Image (cartoon, helix red, strand yellow):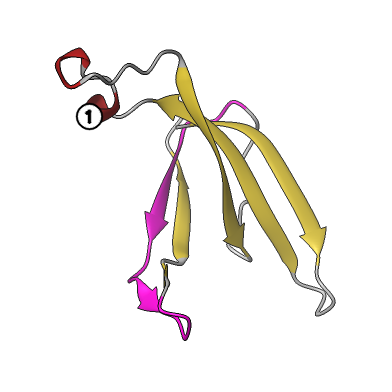
Amino acid sequence: MKLVGLAQYKGPDGVVKSTLHVIDDFAEYQNDASQGRVAKGQSCEAIYVGSVDVSGLKLGDTIEILYGKAVKMKDGNFFQPVKAVKQLK
C-alpha cells in the first residue's frame, strides 16, 4: 500500500499518536464480474497506528502494516492492534 497522508497529534500523556492514510489496489474478490462485483480505481483507508514509531516514513512510501493478535473487547467487538509499520520502498 502507498502512504498518501500522515496525521499526528500529541495526546495529553505527551505521546505522539498517528493515523496513516493509504491507497491500495482493490482485493481480487472485490472485482469479480461473474459475481456482480466491480471495483475500479484504488481503495483508500485511514489506519490508526497509535504510538507505533512512523518517524522514518515519507509520503509516497510503499508500506506494510503488521498486526498483533485480535483482542475481544467488553462490548463484544474485536480490536486488532498494529504491531509495526514496515517501509518497503
Please indicate, yes or no, whether residue 56 appears anywhere in the rendered image.
Answer: no
Residue 27, image x, y percentages: 30, 29
Query: Judging from the image, what secondary structure is the residue with disc 1 in?
Result: helix
Report the span colored magenta: 60-76
Position above or below: 17 against 61: below
Position above or below: 11 against 89: below
Query: Label 1, on which residue?
Result: 29
Q: Quadrant of residue 60?
A: top right
Give the residue displayed 65% in from the left and 30% down from the top. Answer: 59
Crowding near the residue tagged with mark 1, few <14, some 14–19, many ≥20 C-alpha atoms within 10 Å? few
Residue 57, image x, y percentages: 61, 41
Is 68 or 54 nearer to us in this picture?
Answer: 68
Residue lying farthest to the left in this orientation: 34
* 59 sits to left or right of 29: right
* 44 sits to left or right of 54: left
Taking the magenta stretch, the answer to whether it contains residue 29 is no
What type is the residue that disc 1 sits on? Tyr
Residue 36, image x, y percentages: 24, 19
Residue 20, image x, y percentages: 61, 45
Give the residue displayed 21% in from the left and 19% down from the top. Answer: 32
Give the residue displayed 44% in from the left and 27% down from the top. Answer: 24
Give the residue displayed 75% in from the left and 71% down from the top. Answer: 15
Position above or below: 63 against 9: above
